[in-house]
Image (tube, helix red, strand yellow):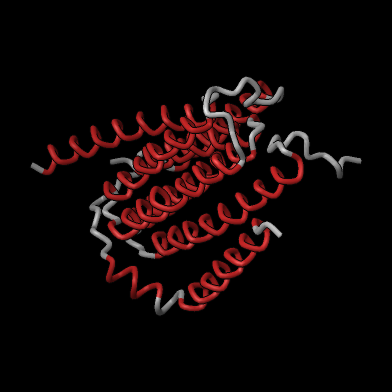
Amino acid sequence: MLLNQFLFLAAALFCIGVYGVLARRNGVMVLMSVELILNAVNINLVAFGAYRHDITGQVFALFVIAVAAAEVGVGLALVLMLYRNRRSIDIDDVDLMKG
Amino acid sequence: MLAELMVAENIAFYLIAGLMVFAALRVVTTRNIVHAALYLVLVLAGVAALYILLAAEFIAITQVLVYIGAIVVLFLFGIMLTRAPMGPMHDSDNEQRAVGAAIAVVLLGIMGFTLFRAFRDVQFDDLQVQTTNQVATSVFSTYLLPFEILSVVLLAALIGAIVLARRD
């Protein structure tokens, strides 16, 4: 297998995730797109770790998974707060700080 | 024998990769939010399969346990608690769709070009299984401090999520 197969797939997933973050209105859907981005990064880490016969790639991917779990927990709590206060989770409406 | 194995590896990779790209595209384009969460499961399972293809056993199991087992369930709870419509939503995307798509395509072009230039013919020479034992040794020796800090981060996130989501 070529290393590039994995890197290209990760790049594609990353770009799809970026599109999702930019184009989605729903807060939960934006968080799902962020998960796509984080997974793309993890694929890169593990692929380079396997290529270099270095365990560090996997250890870092584990750390990223743990941080992603924390991020989803707090992110969904924030979305829930948003829903309670405004009865909508359309993040395009959250523009109180717009100058 | 080895050549046949490598062909099999490639076929498996392209099957998984095709499925993952399709599912990821559906995650960001479908109008039904529950479908988006279920397509996300497909992407995450594909990532786990890629880890197995890369002979990284522990992280593949962790991917299934943490992502498919916990995070997707959290997403489904989030969908339920915010009373998202179960059917298709008519306003799931904003008016920046075209700009977003253009940015994503340009980004993919730049990254693809760079990757092609940098790693054109780089092969995995021989994939060695990276065992759970090795991962544990590394985590509990070289990366002990980040590991401990990570547990504090998780605790802080847990308390933060409870404080934010509590009804009082």
Residue drawn where x is 27% and y is 62% of the image? B130
The outermost residue toward the right is A99
Position above or below: A3 against B35:
below
Location of the N terminus of chain A by quadrant is top left
Position above or below: A3 against B93:
below
Q: How many marks?
A: 0
Percent across and percent down for residue B12 are 24, 36
Percent across and percent down for residue A7 are 43, 41
Q: Nearer the viewer, residue A4 or B12?
A: B12
Q: Nearer the viewer, residue B98 or B89?
A: B89
Residue drawn where x is 34% and y is 68% of the image? B135
Q: Nearer the viewer, residue B93 or B141?
A: B93
Percent across and percent down for residue B48 are 34, 47
Residue drawn where x is 50% and y is 41% of the image? A36
A23 left or right of B25? Answer: right
B60 left or right of B92? Answer: left
Percent across and percent down for residue A91 are 71, 37
Residue drawn where x is 92% and y is 41% of the image? A99
The outermost residue toward the left is B1
